[in-house]
Image (cartoon, rainbow, N blue to C red):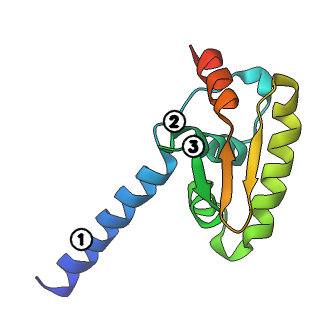
């Protein structure tokens, strides 16, 4: 395998990993008034097998500049919580790990998407 083939291989691997972190895009209700980054974060949490993602995974999924750091994710989660609170959707903070949707929140989202 030459260098160009190896670079193509790594780019494809990166694309597949990114797709796995984002998950299948869900059409969240318009009335939730989510920004694109908030939709990507919520989608990543919702489609994760355990509805949990690390700070780093959410940075990648939301396509926020990775150099912006965890503080940017904290701000986005804060705004997302304010928008989702009226719908009883809760995002739990997992200290030093990331964030997770509560089981009840997953049910509420599933019903909203149905």
Looking at the image, is mark 1 or mark 2 earlier in the sequence?
Answer: 1
Q: Is residue 99 left or right of residue 5?
A: right
Q: Quadrant of the C terminus?
A: top right
Q: Mark 2 points at which residue?
A: 25
Real-space Cα distance between discs 1 and 2? 25 Å
Give the label, 3 or 2, closer to the camera. Answer: 3
Determine the secondary structure under disc 3.
Answer: loop
Q: Name the residue under label 1.
A: 9
Q: In this view, does 51 lie to the left or right of 93?
A: left
Q: Quadrant of the N terminus?
A: bottom left
Residue 9 lies, in percent from the top left, at 24, 71
Residue at 33% from the left image edge and 69% from the top image edge: 11
Q: Mark 3 points at which residue?
A: 51
Residue at 47% from the left image edge and 43% from the top image edge: 49
**What is the quadrant of residue 71 in the picture?**
bottom right
Looking at the image, is mark 1 or mark 3 earlier in the sequence?
Answer: 1
Real-space Cα distance between discs 1 and 3? 29 Å
Real-space Cα distance between discs 3 and 2? 14 Å
Q: In this view, does 106 lie to the left or right of 9?
A: right
Determine the secondary structure under disc 2.
Answer: loop
Residue 35 lies, in percent from the top left, at 75, 41
Q: Are marks 3 and 2 in contact (CB under 8 Å)?
A: no
Instruction: Reply above or below: 10 against 52.
Output: below
Q: Do the residues labelled 1 and 3 touch (CB within 8 Å)?
A: no
Looking at the image, is mark 3 or mark 2 earlier in the sequence?
Answer: 2
Determine the secondary structure under disc 1.
Answer: helix
Instruction: Reply above or below: 76 against 4.
Output: above
Please rate how many residues cluster around mark 2, counting C-alpha atoms within 10 Å: few if below 14, some from 14 to 19, many from 20.
some
Residue at 72% from the left image edge and 73% from the top image edge: 69
Residue 89 lies, in percent from the top left, at 76, 31
């Amino acid at each position: 395998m030459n260098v160009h083939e190896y670079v193509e291989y790594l780019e494809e691997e990166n694309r597949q990993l990114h797709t796995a972190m984002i998950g299948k895009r869900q059409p969240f209700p318009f009335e939730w008034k989510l920004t694109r980054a908030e939709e990507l974060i919520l989608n990543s949490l919702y489609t994760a097998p355990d509805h949990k993602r690390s700070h780093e995974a959410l940075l990648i999924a939301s396509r926020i500049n990775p150099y912006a750091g965890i503080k940017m994710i904290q701000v986005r989660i804060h705004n997302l919580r304010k928008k989702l609170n009226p719908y009883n959707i809760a995002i739990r903070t997992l200290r030093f790990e990331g964030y997770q949707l509560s089981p009840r929140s997953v049910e509420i989202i599933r019903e909203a998407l149905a």
